[in-house]
Amino acid sequence: MSRFSRITGTGSYLPPRRLSNAELVAELAAKGVETSDDWIVERTGIRARHFAEADVGVSDLALHACRKAIEAAGCQAADIDLIIVATSTPDMVFPSSACILQNKLGVAGCPAFDVQAVCSGFVYALTLADALIKTGSASRALVVGAEVFSRILDFSDRTTCVLFGDGAGAVVLEASDVPGIWATDLHADGKHVDILCVPGHVSGGKASGSPLLTMDGQAVFKLAVGVLEDAARAVLAKAGKTEADVDWLIPHQANIRIMQSTAKKLKLSMDKVVVTVDQHGNTSAASIPLALDTAVRSGKIKKGDTLMLEGVGGGFTWGAVLLDY
Ligand code: UT7
């Protein structure tokens, strides 16, 4: 009998501090940075984002999301035998946020590690967990995307600081006799390192270089719309399915225009696209599981629906996962 993996529970968490565009625009104006609600909405679709308090780390956001996912799956933290956290804003340089999260969940023993693929991180982490479950190395994985991008934003750069937010999403992925995950497709092209990066590093006991995010938005935009179409077609071909089989497209929530373009290329109506960028902003690795959990809990996504998850981000990295929920 074949062994597959299947999502049995989802959870998410947003830190309580919510900033509407109007509030962010006012805060930035006080610092002499000029932007507007109109510009942000028109160019990105973003209307609000959440920022974590200064003493809250990625593992704290992840913990809330994981507790909800574990509850939804009807299991206990002690039943989890693999923890993967996708993040680019870890609590520490090391150990991994996954190890810190494991301890906060009150469990020990199972493997726990972070995946660094920026905004594609959740799709990478889900692919790894699926592979480890299929080989029998794990049976019940906690797969998390969590970020505090507010920590690495340059609030004097209006081209980036209006785009991102903080949050966490998680799924419990369990071994199953039936899919579950039909197919996965991951890619990277390291020649594009410079178009989206935080170039600083720790050296000689101090941060060396800028610890803040820089992005060539137009270059990222152009690459994103191309690779998202490619990844979608690749994962459908691997699964022997077509666009018509997709009930819900859950793309990385970076920009509504990228999502519209992807949906158009795949001939999917926007009614089939889960959109949360308006309320969450771009939460990098957290954006897909946050969108998934929001759509599950609102009743949009139902058991048995076929979902296409798609990530794209710094690296450059991209990928897709096709699954039956
Ligand atoms: O999660 C990783 C993936 N990241 C992404 O997917 C981001 C992809 N890129 C984008 O989403 C878009 O490129 C942006 C939203 C970042 C920018 O939108 P755009 O339509 O490409 O704008 P632009 O960079 O061409 O800038 C247009 C104008 C410029 O002014 P001029 O040169 O035309 O006078 C900018 O200076 O908009 C100006 N501008 C702003 N104005 C008001 C840039 N940022 C702002 C701002 N408020 N916040």
Image (cartoon, grey):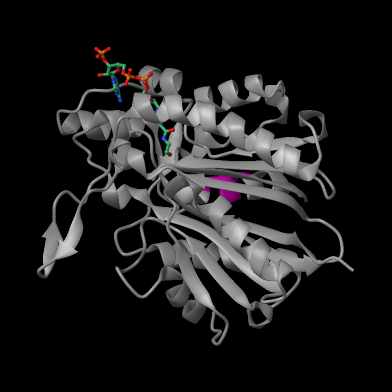
Quadrant of the image where one finds ligand 1: top left
Q: Residue at x 57, y 82 (%)?
A: 110
Spot occupied by residue 161 in the image (x, y as percentages of width and height): 30, 36
Q: Is residue 249 above or below residue 104?
A: above
How many discs appear? 0
Q: Is residue 299 visible?
A: no
Spot occupied by residue 92 in the image (x, y as percentages of width and height): 31, 69
Q: Residue at x 73, y 38 (%)?
A: 236
- Per the rendered image, the range of residues in magenta is 287-291
Which residue is nearer to you in this view: 214 or 169? 214
Q: Quadrant of the N terminus?
A: bottom right
Q: Residue at x 64, y 21 (%)?
A: 265
Q: Main secondary structure of the magenta part?
A: helix
Image-based side of 141 in relation to 48, left or right: right
Q: Residue at x 34, y 66 (%)?
A: 91
Which residue is nearer to you in this view: 231 or 75? 231
Image quadrant where residue 75 sits: bottom right
Image quadrant where residue 9 sits: bottom right
Image quadrant where residue 26 sits: top left
Image-based side of 316 in relation to 225, left or right: left
Spot occupied by residue 190 in the image (x, y as percentages of width and height): 37, 45
Spot occupied by residue 64 in the image (x, y as percentages of width and height): 54, 64
Q: Is residue 54 above or below residue 228?
A: below
Magenta stretch holds residue 290: yes
Image-based side of 158 in relation to 274, left or right: left
Image-based side of 159 in relation to 282, left or right: left
Give the residue at the far bottom of this rendering: 109
Q: Is residue 36 visible?
A: yes
Give the residue at the far right of this rendering: 1
Q: Is residue 2 above or below residue 80?
A: above
